[in-house]
């Protein structure tokens, strides 16, 4: 059983590396003012993911209520739309940045202090969506390996802890190129690259989920 719980943490850590998860958190993290703020956004995303995962777990496992699979496909489709929107937003905001060639510093750019709450809410909302979309797969894995309802929720808690910690650290690693002591790419170009990746991943998700939605009505 101990091995199973260790595995839960490892799977939670691995889950943070899903391309759509990384793209979503990275687009938000590029708007943070420091590495600590970046880590916070990753953790908030993880908390949002945990909230919906626990809600769906209580419905599916605790109350034994079945949810049609099309609901989760719809969440995937919404995530695709959100990623495209976030990517376009990041690319658009990169136009407001400029590079000061004289002192090699990036000027403009990051969010003012009074917008931190708005940014945190964005991270939370995207985390909630990702948690909703991925709940069915995670719960199916737990249901086939664990019998006790208490152990199932313990597994989910440990999975979520691994996810939150992993995403916080991953957010720092992904945005390290932006910070002065180790910066090797202009902030503006980094945001353009980040936004473009988010758009491409979002379009891919839209294509895949649209195909799945189409089969539901055939």
Image (cartoon, helix red, strand yellow):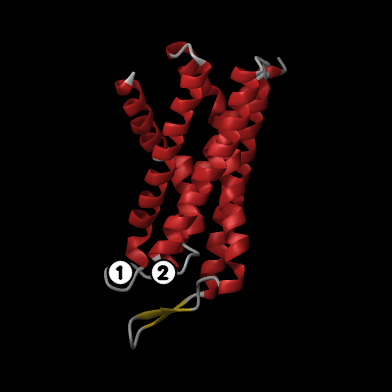
Comparing 191 with 144, the one in front is 144
Is residue 207 among what the camera can see? no
Q: Residue at x 60, y 29 (%)?
A: 209
Give the number of the disc on residue 32: none
Question: Toward the viewer: 10 or 32?
Answer: 10
Pointer 2 residue = 187
The crowd level at tag 2 (other Cα within 10 Å; few <14, some 14-19, many 20+) is many
Mark 1 secondary-structure assignment:
loop
In the rendering, at what x and y percent does residue 56 appear? 62, 27
Circles 1 and 2, Cβ within 8 Å, touching? The answer is yes
| x and y percentages locating residue 12 in the rendered image | 40, 34
Label 1: how many residues lie within 10 Å, few (<14), some (14-19) or many (20+)?
few
Residue occupying image coordinates x 46% and y 27%: 154
Residue behind mark 1? 183
Q: Picture coordinates of residue 75 (x, y %)?
A: 63, 33
Q: Residue furthest right?
A: 217
State the CA–CA distance, disc 1 to disc 2: 9 Å
Classify 92 as above or below 14: below
């Amino acid at each position: 059983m101990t091995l199973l719980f260790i595995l839960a943490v490892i799977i939670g850590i691995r889950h943070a590396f899903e391309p759509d998860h990384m793209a979503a958190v990275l687009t938000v993290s590029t708007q943070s003012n420091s590495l600590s703020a970046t880590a916070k956004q990753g953790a908030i995303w993880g908390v949002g993911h945990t909230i919906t995962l626990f809600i769906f777990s209580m419905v599916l496992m605790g109350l034994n209520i079945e949810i049609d699979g099309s609901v989760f496909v719809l969440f995937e489709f919404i995530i695709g739309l959100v990623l495209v929107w976030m990517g376009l937003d990041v690319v658009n905001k990169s136009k407001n940045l400029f590079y000061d060639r004289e002192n090699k510093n990036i000027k403009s750019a990051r969010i003012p202090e009074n917008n931190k709450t708005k940014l945190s809410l964005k991270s939370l909302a995207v985390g909630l969506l990702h948690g909703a979309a991925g709940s069915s797969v995670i719960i199916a894995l737990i249901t086939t390996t664990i019998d006790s309802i208490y152990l199932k929720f313990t597994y989910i808690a440990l999975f979520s802890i691994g996810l939150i910690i992993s995403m916080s650290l991953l957010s720092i690693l992904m945005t390290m190129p932006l910070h002065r002591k180790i910066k090797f790419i202009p902030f503006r170009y980094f945001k353009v690259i980040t936004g473009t990746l988010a758009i491409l991943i979002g379009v891919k998700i839209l294509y895949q989920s649209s195909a799945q939605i189409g089969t539901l009505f055939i």
